[in-house]
Amino acid sequence: MAATTAKHQTMRWSDLDEDDDYGGGGGGGLSALQLPPRVVIGPDENGIKKTVEYRLNEEGKAVRVTTTTRVREVARTRVTKRAAERRGWAKFGDAAHNDDAGARLTVVSPEEIVLERPSAPGIAVVSSSLVLHPLIPALDKGAALMVCRICNAKGKHWTSKCPNKDFAPLQLDALVDNNIPPNSGGDNGGGSRPGKYVPPKPRESEMRRRNDENSVRVTNLSEDTREEDLRELFGSFGPLTRAYVALDHRTGESRGFGFLSFVYREDAERAIAKLNGYGYDSLILNVEWAAPRPN
DNA sequence: GATGAGCGA
């Protein structure tokens, strides 16, 4: 706690900084301007700071007010007990090797965050999803209601018909890194114009988007095989956009089969070749190309 | 033995 003594006059903390309001409009003969200025001494090596100032009391008389404050004490009591406790811990990581770093270990994040202003014209927004999609031409009025939630194309197609729907965000990044073009066939007219709104990263629901082209069906799964298990098993062949185990709606139990969608068809082929007939959980897996789901 | 769920007109 700050050790503060104020002589001649009781005062509040808030008074300390109000050096321009002496007298408070009281009707004395003296004015604040005639009072000696406030003098601050210290803080010294012990953190003691003295302030000497002159004020007018209620009767308009000048009084000297001396305030003594232990500055360090104040700073120390600003932290909680637990925080103070943590200061006693042994340093680790970078802080253990660099005394100086201990005080400021905050680092700049390498993550690139694009802030876009939708209304600003001509702003080139660079993001992984945008790079993959060519710009779309100006669109017809009235078509704007149809907005693809994957590539943000307006008036082109619905999300379910998006030519890029099979590329989950993680795979998108992989494609950028590997310089592999996206679904190159046909109408891939999705995309966004620079300066337009760029949708946020797709969520979990979009991560699981199915991809009939590269999907395999796996049957003869044991009851307790979960999607994570399939991911682990099939993921070794290449990136997946979806792992799904069919569940009974009523019991929630596995129906013994599931589906996996690969980013690359070749990976799906290899998975079929390797895992069809593969013993898993004491059962023999059956892995084939999945038929497109009927409407 | 067996072919999936879900965000909009």
Image (cartoon, grey):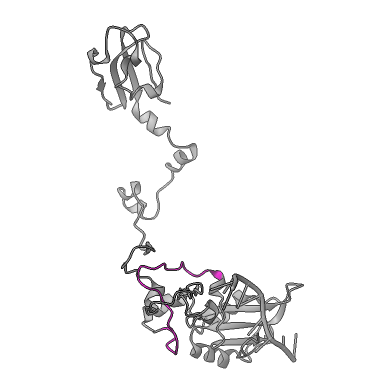
Q: Nearer the viewer, residue A36 or A68?
A: A36
**In the rendered view, does A143 fall on the left or right side of A224?**
left
Q: Is residue A290 above or below residue A136?
A: below
Which quarter of the image is occupied by the C terminus of chain A? bottom right
Which range of residues does the magenta coloring cover?
A: A182-204
Coordinates of residue A13 in the picture (x, y in percent) = 40, 23
Quarter holding residue A53: top left
A222 with respect to A5 (left or right): right
Q: Is residue A200 magenta?
A: yes
Q: Is residue A105 above or below residue A252?
A: above
Describe residue A252's horizontal placement relative to residue A108 as left or right. right
Residue at 33% over, 23% down: A18
Instruction: Specify the farthest residue to the right.
Output: A250
The residue at 37%/81% (across/down) is A178
**Main SS category, magenta section:** loop
| Residue drawn at 31 percent across, 51 percent down | A98
The answer to which of A284 and A250 lies nearer the viewer is A250
On the rendered structure, is A115 left or right of A253? left
Q: Quadrant of residue A52?
A: top left
Q: Position of residue A6 (x, y in %)?
A: 37, 15
Q: In this rendering, is residue A77 above or below A58?
A: below
Q: Quadrant of the N terminus of chain A?
A: top left
How many numbered marks, from 0 up?
Answer: 0
Q: Is residue A294 in view from this perspective?
A: yes
Quick one: A46 or A35, which is closer to the camera? A35
* Residue A222 seen from this side: no
Q: Determine if the magenta segment contains residue A115.
A: no
Whether residue A52 is situated above or below residue A100 in the rendered picture: above
Farthest bottom residue in view: A273
- Counting from the top left corner in percent of width and height, residue A264 is at 48, 86
Residue at horizontal 35 percent and vertical 25 percent from the top: A70
Residue ranking furthest to the front: A141
